[in-house]
Amino acid sequence: MMSKLELKEDKMLEVQFVGDDDVLNHILDREGGAKLKKERAQLLVNTKKIIKKPEYDLEEDDQEVLKDQNYVDVLGRDIQESLKNGSAADGGNKVYSFQNRKHSEKMAKLGHSASDKVQLKNSDKSEFLSTAPSGLRKRLIVPRSHSDSESEYSASNSEDDDGVAQEYEEDTNEVILSQKIPSQNRAISAPICKETPSKKMKRDKTSDLVEEYFEAHSSSKVLTSDRTLQKLKRAKLDQQTLRNLLSKVSPSFSAELKQLNQQYEQLFYKWMLQLRLGFNIVLYGLGSKRDLLERFRTTVLQDSIHVVINGFFPGISVKSILNSITEEALDHAGTFRSVLDQLDWIVNRLKEDSSLELFLLIHNLDSQMLRGDKSQQIIGQLSSLHNIYLIASIDHLNAPLMWDHAKQSLYNWLWYETTTYSPYTEETSYENSLLVKQSGSLPLSSLTHVLRSLTPNARGIFRLLIKYQLDNQDNPSYLGFSFQDFYQQCREAFLVNSDLTLRAQLTEFRDHKLLRTKKGTDGVEYLLIPVDNGTLSDFLEKEEEES
Amino acid sequence: MATSSVSKGCFVFKPNFKKRKISVPVEDYFNKGKNESEDSKLRYETYHLIWQQMKSETEQLQEELNKNLFDSLTEFLQKSYSGFQKNSRDWGCQIKLREIPTAALILGVNVTDHDLTFRSLTEALQNNVTPYVVSLQAKDCPDIKHFLQKLASQLMDCCVDEESKEGSIQVAQKKTHCSMDSLSSWYMNVTQKTDSKMPRKKRTSTSQWQSPPVVLILKDMESFTTKVLQDFIIISSQHLHEFPLILIFGIATSPIIIHRLLPHAVSSLLCIELFQSLSCKEHLTTVLDKLLLTTQFPFKLSEKVLQILTNIFLYHDFSIQNFIKGLQLSLLEHFYSQPLSVLCCNLPEAKRRINFLSDNQCENIRRLPSFRRYVEKQASEKQVALLTNERFLKIRELYCTCLEKNIRDSEEYVSALQLLRMLAKDDLMTILQKCFQVFKSSSEKQLGSTAKRIEEFLAQFQSLDEAKEEEDTSGSQSKGLQKTDLYHLQKSLLEMKELRRTSKKQTRFEVLREKVVNFIDSLVREYLLPPETQPLHEVVYFSAAHTLREHLNAAPRIALHTALNNPYYYLKNEALKSEEGCIPNVAPDICIAYKLHLECSRLINLVDWSEAFATVVTAAEKMDANSITSEERNEIIHARFIRAVSELELLGFIKPTKQKTDHVARLTWGGC
């Protein structure tokens, strides 16, 4: 294998004018994370030497690859053996090489060819760009962090003979540019496409993991477009509409998904066996494992006491888990001074009565609320009891970091990969998701509800405050409405007759969390509505419509 | 009953009372998953038996290995304790009395095994030295108050064991206020009480002291806060005369840590002695010897499995416990997945079981690849016989089990052989003697003759002894090294070498040695074949290394990455097939969103992202969806995008950020 690779290298180094695309392909095919890491380290140490002697360098690389593969082999990652398991077959070396430039191009291509219209309508920037001459585009500069990938684009264009294809590709590039780069941030740079293939190859390789990480995190300035969701009309959806909309989507690949699930369901009895023999089971892999665990519960756990714990539930805590175990599962009426006391009690109780068996099903053991060290320690101690059986699922990328060796030995995990691709509907429904603006819809409705129950005068007071706040929304040093001024205005509008009545009204608002008061540096009280301005203006509009 | 609610996160399910009574026996799960359940019960029982044996064996081993350590510890404790007792007026002794006797126990980095060691240590101490053994962990003692509270409550618990009546009330009272004063007064109380009771009960029987010392074990010394440790040591050294404390530090790293944690003023209050536990590597070797390289357990691991287990051990945790866990899992897997594992038991039992083999099981045997290979090598007539005659089959079986007991790693063998050639006579003889013992003890028919031959060799060596010794000495004298200068020395050495090579005149010893080595070589070649070449090795060898690895040393990140990058790997749909690094636009939404997010740097603009997503997805849908309006379609796509983004957030790839409006931050790096 080594000699073969060397041959390839020689060929590439001799032939000077290969199309850049080919060179790229060549590199990308061969690149593996492990190898790159090694090489990167070398380059950091002594770049010059390696550029001078490319053959030597490459030879060494191959050896490194071999070494790494040896290690991988030793660890038993045998591709042939494990066709079922994604983690095993993919090997270690591909994991961290997120090399996808070529692909992204293709993706955008796909997108672009199919829907010019969408692009034109939605992004004025891409429209602007596509009218720009191709020469201009070469002078466009790309923010530092993108320089490598973008240079590839320009390079591949410059040597492409096919005119149609070139134009086509340029379009796609622009689509990508418009995604990433705000036009005002572009500056001029020398075209990078004039490099010789071999040198370029070097550059490509260097632009990986470690350096990219530091590149991405070094400059405090990140260059992205300034467009905001507010300009898009359908930016905000509430949970309900989202569900309705998604219910219209017909799921794809249902046959394959079903097959996957059936595979996992065959393991149910094995899981039971292993649970009973003192192991605990943790499920990982992409896709919600809730349904799977639910089926597990209904098929095999019907005859035993079990507790289902939704880790993704925002109000969950170790305390509540222990409470439901002591109070409901073990019928204990007393209370405990601390969580540790409670744990001790459970441990003693279960040790005394060995016929007592308890199954714990935890969806998302790695959720925000449970991932803390203390929670994990307590759950781990629970799970180490021989008559508590724990089967849990984890989803977060870094979930295994929760457990050090001590905790891992408490848990005594057996890992099972269950990639289901099912949507995390339940798991994400609680969370304050990025685009699901709960803060938008909820306070608005509560605003209207609360204000409807108030007297017209109180509504007037509040409206006054809203208006004042909206008038000042562009003022960065706006602290709030000072109480005295506010009182003055309310009096002028015949809304209150004394500052006591005003204060009584304000207390009402404060109780509904519609008002916050702050003391300024001068001791003056400032009033502020802790609701975002968009909601407030929506509210005002609605009010006006109604009246 | 539903398991989702907006108001609670825990749901308890209790079956009806009647049903609860019947608890399903474990072995039922053993066969439920599988169709062929003929002998699964038997298999489970065999598994259970072997596992119990192995477990008790390891526990025993652990005990033996720890014995030395514990003995010396106990001795130390008793010695230092007698210091308290003497109460001598000697000045040196009084100085010593100020110091808290401390044992620093170096246990190695395999933290997970420590618990077991401490547990047996506590037991040993309670049996031999004092009833008052308390062990504390750093996480229970964030400050000195908690430290003392824990100490007190555990001490009281020790005491409760002895006098079970009054204990619980005391605990409740003392928990609130704890100081060293109260502790020592409590101690006085207790010792006096036991003193008054003792004479009647068991003073004569045990070597109980008047006032037994209190042993405090700090399990993980490194993780204690220095302040707490220092304070405690200073305080307790003041009370030492009334509260005889002995400390045991559990140390995972190196003894230097004591001086790093404690300033000189504090460490001078301690009288430290070091104790070193057995290194975990040696421990593993003994475990391997006792569990896998013996004939006691029929179950064997194939080379790969063993390698995985040892690698997890060496590269990940140094934990014997985990190793044992891996062993248990492989045992379980073997009996669970290999129907022929029913024969994996000791020899006479296997013989008996073979006689009861059903047709079905014989069929299973025939299907084994190793058996096939074996059959193909035989003459054609024999083939027919083998495939039809079940009697014949059974005999072969036994033969193979016999053979497989002698397997050692073949790679190591080569180096061992080379070493053997170099060996001096004495070593060789001892080794031969050992071999002789081994062969004798195994007492197989085929091996009987070899044992005899080795005996012969030994006899020859014996007879050689006198004659040869003279020869040797004379030889060395004649070529006695003239200690004149370096040059001459070199020259003469070279000459000697030449002489050896050219003359080829070997001493009788060398001839004999060559013979022995050749004999052993042939022996090994004959009997110590790699297990894979043996017919029916599947019966006793567990070789599914990948399952072991999947379950013990899983890689969730890789699985996630594969699922996101290459959905075809899981969903075998032709539409998803694509070349390396690309995904088709019909892929699941989350894959597309993930791919797009890889193109961005630290921050991602949600608007751009959603547009790119819409572009890709619309392209995929274009053909079929003409029935709904474009506006509605866009809304649906947007909803899908939202879902994909929140799923990526859940998975930890992105998080919301306030650095810029409508942006999210990427949490992984790489890509462009």
Image (tube, coloured by chain):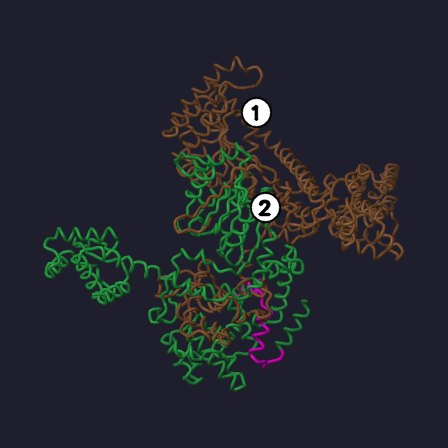
Chain colours: A green, B brown
Q: Is residue B426 visible?
A: no
Question: Magenta stretch mostly in which secondary structure?
Answer: helix
Same chain for mark 1 and mark 2? The answer is no
Query: What segment carries the magenta color?
Result: A14-43
Location of residue A506 with respect to A406 vertically, above or below = below
Residue type indicated by callout 2: Met
Q: Is residue A258 left or right of residue B435?
A: left
- Please state the horizontal and vertical placement of residue A103, each as a whole percent of the image: 53, 72
Q: Residue shown at 38%/29% (left/top)?
A: B178
Q: Chain of mark 2?
A: A
- Please state the horizontal and vertical placement of residue B268, each as a whole percent of the image: 45, 33
- Please state the horizontal and vertical placement of residue B406, each as a whole percent of the image: 78, 45
Q: Which residue is mark 1?
A: B128
Q: Residue furthest top?
A: B200
Q: Nearer the viewer, residue B471 or A87?
A: A87
Q: How would you rate the neighbour count of disc 2 (Cα within 10 Å): few for under 14, some for 14-19, many for 20 or more?
A: many
Q: Is residue A25 a member of the stretch shown in magenta?
A: yes
Q: Nearer the viewer, residue A489 or B86?
A: A489
User: In terms of secondary structure, where does tag 2 sit?
Assistant: helix
Location of residue A175 with respect to A32 vertically, above or below = below
Tally of numbered discs: 2
Determine the CA span between mark 1 and mark 2: 42 Å
Residue A356, which numbered label?
none
Residue A272, which numbered label?
2
User: In terms of secondary structure, where does tag 1 sit?
Assistant: helix
Q: Residue shown at 41%/84% (left/top)?
A: A131
Residue type indicated by callout 1: Asn
Q: Is residue B446 left or right of residue B250?
A: right
